[in-house]
Amino acid sequence: MASQLIQQVRVIDPVTPLDQVADVRVVDGQITAIGASLTQDGDALIAGQGKVLLPGLIDLYSHSGEPGNESRETLASLLRAGGAGGFTRIGLLPTTQPTIDSPALVADLQYRRNTLARSQTVPQLALWGALTQAAQGDSLTELAELAAAGIVGFTDSRPLQNPLLLRRVLEYAQPLKKPLAFWPCDRTLVGQGVAREGDYSLIYGLPGDPALSETTALATLLECVAAIGTPVHVMRLSTARGVELVSQAKAAGLPITVSTTWMHLLHSTADLKTYDVNLRVAPPLGNPEDQAALIEAVADGRIDAIAVDHRPYTYEEKTVGFPSAPPGVIGLELALPLLWQTFVATQRWPATTLVQRLSSGPAACLGQQPPRLQPHQPAEMILFDPEARWEVSSATLHSHASNTPWLGQTLQGQVLQLWSG
């Protein structure tokens, strides 16, 4: 019997809610007791002073290189990166090669993950199945077969340009009771845009992508949801006007959940003066007023979850000019320490708010039970030291890729241990 006693650690659980210093005993992967001062009884001791015990984090959606682009990321390196960043569950988008649009590939990826889990502690995989064949937006996949194969939900992770097909998706998928995630974006309005249209895109001479590319597609999606009633998840929200639209929809009772990415909370177009290709993301970083609206909506709960949208690329792929760079950055190992230092350490948000948006909020979006720090619950949790410092480098990152604007910088905050539940 394996027994551990974490002594005098700050325990934060937004579900309870709980935020207090306590001792926590874990026996054979289950929390057995939480108390002010538990007696030692043959436990392996873990010093918790100055550290924080959090429920396992859940990433709604991220990209893997495997299968098809293992030079970017393997499944093993993705899972190690997720574990190092405190994520006990990772939503894997169907953007592999081949696309996750068949039950056979769903089974194969779960087998690969379970094989890795025999020799190491790795996060659980929540596999998204493609809505359309090869995620090309032309014809629907066999939705019922994918649902039966055990996917967590459906998304193409790409804009669905055909409104008629969108309507059919909402109708056909309704009885399957699986989450449907959509990225609202009208590619015809994006044009050649690589930065959110506004003063900064003009100042820096970058082709502008107007907010209309998000809001027109979002308005279409919300109108379809209002007419058909199928619940949906709005992913990658990035504009102030988008926040207004989803706020109005929620107030009207539409069955929607919403996420934004961690990069859109930490950066805006004002930061593009460096032309760092690792600030090239999709949708593009918002203008400062967009960033402020997203931060406020996360704080008050109109945005349900923060997603990482981890997207690895090789050095060669990113070593090009800003407009030519493929959009996306890694983030599984970086999101928690950077968000903690930006919002919790500065007291802009209570710790429970950040943890909720990274744990129980994403769980609700996926229709899953959240991790809980309570006796008689599985120990799906992480030990986090908000004061630990470490340098971001290719040697310290568990991901194969290092496409991040924080490469070479020293961060504060590190996950020390993970229990996968």
Image (cartoon, helix red, strand yellow):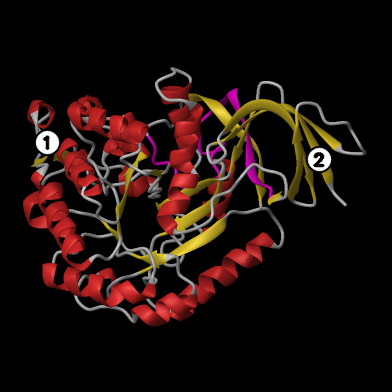
Give the residue furthest to the right: 42
Question: Compared to 75, does 388 lie above or below?
Answer: above
- Residue 239: image location, x then y, percent: 19, 39
Q: Is residue 43 visible?
A: yes
Inter-mark Cα distance, 1 to 2: 54 Å
Q: Report which residue position mark 2 lands on.
A: 4
| Residue found 44% across the figure and 17% down from its top | 346
Residue 180 image-quadrant placement: bottom left
Magenta segment range? 378-404
Look at discs 1 and 2 and give the one toward the viewer: 2
| Residue found 25% across the figure and 42% down from its top | 320
Residue 295 image-quadrant placement: top left
Q: Which mark is residue 206?
A: 1
Q: Nearer the viewer, residue 209 or 76?
A: 209
| Residue found 43% across the figure and 32% down from its top | 407
Q: Is residue 63 visible?
A: no
Q: Nearer the viewer, residue 234 or 333?
A: 234
